[in-house]
Image: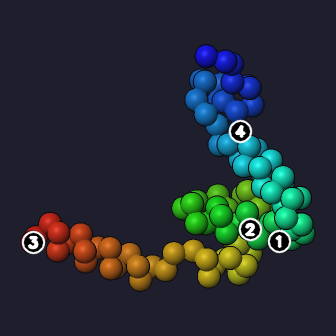
Amino acid sequence: MRPTPRRWVSEKGHPSMEGFMARITTVLLCVAFLVGLSGPALRHFYASWLIEQGFLAKKVQSLLGHGSIQMTFDTYGHLFPDPEDDYAKLEAGELELVG
Protein backbone atom coordinates (compact mmCIF):
# COMPACT_ATOMS: atom_id res chain seq x y z
CA MET A 1 0.00 0.00 0.00
CA ARG A 2 1.45 3.35 -0.96
CA PRO A 3 1.68 6.12 1.65
CA THR A 4 -1.00 8.78 1.75
CA PRO A 5 0.16 12.42 1.78
CA ARG A 6 -0.01 13.78 5.33
CA ARG A 7 -2.28 16.71 4.51
CA TRP A 8 -4.99 14.31 3.36
CA VAL A 9 -5.21 12.43 6.65
CA SER A 10 -5.87 13.48 10.23
CA GLU A 11 -3.41 12.98 13.05
CA LYS A 12 -5.10 9.61 13.73
CA GLY A 13 -4.65 8.53 10.13
CA HIS A 14 -8.29 9.03 9.06
CA PRO A 15 -9.17 10.86 5.84
CA SER A 16 -9.53 14.57 6.59
CA MET A 17 -12.13 16.99 5.28
CA GLU A 18 -9.39 19.50 4.50
CA GLY A 19 -7.55 16.95 2.35
CA PHE A 20 -10.74 15.98 0.58
CA MET A 21 -11.61 19.60 -0.12
CA ALA A 22 -8.06 20.26 -1.39
CA ARG A 23 -8.37 17.37 -3.87
CA ILE A 24 -11.82 18.51 -5.02
CA THR A 25 -10.62 22.10 -5.39
CA THR A 26 -7.67 20.97 -7.52
CA VAL A 27 -9.95 18.94 -9.79
CA LEU A 28 -12.43 21.82 -10.12
CA LEU A 29 -9.68 24.27 -11.00
CA CYS A 30 -8.41 21.94 -13.73
CA VAL A 31 -11.91 21.48 -15.16
CA ALA A 32 -12.55 25.23 -15.00
CA PHE A 33 -9.37 25.93 -16.91
CA LEU A 34 -10.23 23.34 -19.59
CA VAL A 35 -13.77 24.60 -20.19
CA GLY A 36 -12.99 28.29 -19.72
CA LEU A 37 -14.98 29.04 -16.55
CA SER A 38 -14.36 32.36 -14.84
CA GLY A 39 -13.49 32.62 -11.15
CA PRO A 40 -17.01 33.62 -10.05
CA ALA A 41 -18.60 30.88 -12.18
CA LEU A 42 -16.29 28.30 -10.61
CA ARG A 43 -17.14 29.61 -7.13
CA HIS A 44 -20.88 29.29 -7.81
CA PHE A 45 -20.38 25.82 -9.25
CA TYR A 46 -18.39 24.81 -6.17
CA ALA A 47 -21.05 26.17 -3.80
CA SER A 48 -23.89 24.46 -5.65
CA TRP A 49 -21.93 21.19 -5.70
CA LEU A 50 -21.37 21.38 -1.93
CA ILE A 51 -25.07 21.96 -1.36
CA GLU A 52 -26.07 19.14 -3.71
CA GLN A 53 -23.74 16.80 -1.80
CA GLY A 54 -25.63 17.61 1.39
CA PHE A 55 -23.13 19.84 3.15
CA LEU A 56 -24.73 21.86 5.93
CA ALA A 57 -25.17 25.58 5.37
CA LYS A 58 -22.69 26.42 8.14
CA LYS A 59 -19.98 24.30 6.47
CA VAL A 60 -20.71 25.90 3.07
CA GLN A 61 -20.37 29.32 4.74
CA SER A 62 -17.03 28.32 6.21
CA LEU A 63 -15.65 26.80 3.00
CA LEU A 64 -16.66 29.84 0.94
CA GLY A 65 -15.34 32.29 3.53
CA HIS A 66 -18.64 34.12 3.99
CA GLY A 67 -18.70 36.48 6.97
CA SER A 68 -22.20 35.41 8.00
CA ILE A 69 -24.66 32.60 7.40
CA GLN A 70 -27.05 35.26 6.08
CA MET A 71 -24.68 35.96 3.19
CA THR A 72 -24.65 32.25 2.34
CA PHE A 73 -28.45 32.03 2.44
CA ASP A 74 -28.92 35.28 0.52
CA THR A 75 -26.69 33.96 -2.27
CA TYR A 76 -27.40 30.22 -2.28
CA GLY A 77 -30.55 29.78 -0.19
CA HIS A 78 -32.60 28.73 -3.20
CA LEU A 79 -30.29 25.74 -3.71
CA PHE A 80 -30.75 24.22 -0.25
CA PRO A 81 -33.40 21.52 0.10
CA ASP A 82 -36.92 22.78 0.72
CA PRO A 83 -38.12 22.00 4.27
CA GLU A 84 -41.44 20.98 2.75
CA ASP A 85 -39.64 17.97 1.27
CA ASP A 86 -38.96 16.82 4.84
CA TYR A 87 -42.68 16.59 5.53
CA ALA A 88 -43.18 14.38 2.49
CA LYS A 89 -40.33 12.12 3.67
CA LEU A 90 -41.84 11.93 7.15
CA GLU A 91 -45.25 11.01 5.74
CA ALA A 92 -43.77 8.31 3.52
CA GLY A 93 -41.81 6.88 6.44
CA GLU A 94 -44.87 6.92 8.67
CA LEU A 95 -46.92 5.08 6.07
CA GLU A 96 -44.14 2.52 5.68
CA LEU A 97 -43.99 1.93 9.43
CA VAL A 98 -47.73 1.73 10.09
CA GLY A 99 -48.67 0.16 6.83
- On screen, residue 32 versus residue 68, left or right, reads right
Query: Which residue has dot 2 on it?
Result: 45
- Label 4: state its secondary structure: helix
Residue 70 in view in this figure:
no
Q: Amino acid at mark 2?
A: Phe
> Gap between marks 1 and 4, in whole Å?
23 Å
> Gap between marks 3 and 1, in whole Å?
47 Å
Question: Could you tell which of marks 1 and 4 lies nearer the N-terminus?
Answer: 4
- Label 3: state its secondary structure: loop
Quadrant of the snapshot with the N terminus: top right
The residue positioned 34% from the left and 79% from the top of the image is 87
Question: Could you tell which of marks 3 and 2 lies nearer the N-terminus?
Answer: 2
Query: Which residue has dot 1 on it?
Result: 41
Q: Residue 7 placed where, x, y %?
A: 75, 31
Q: How many marks?
A: 4
The residue positioned 38% from the left and 75% from the top of the image is 86
- CB under 8 Å between callouts 3 and 1? no
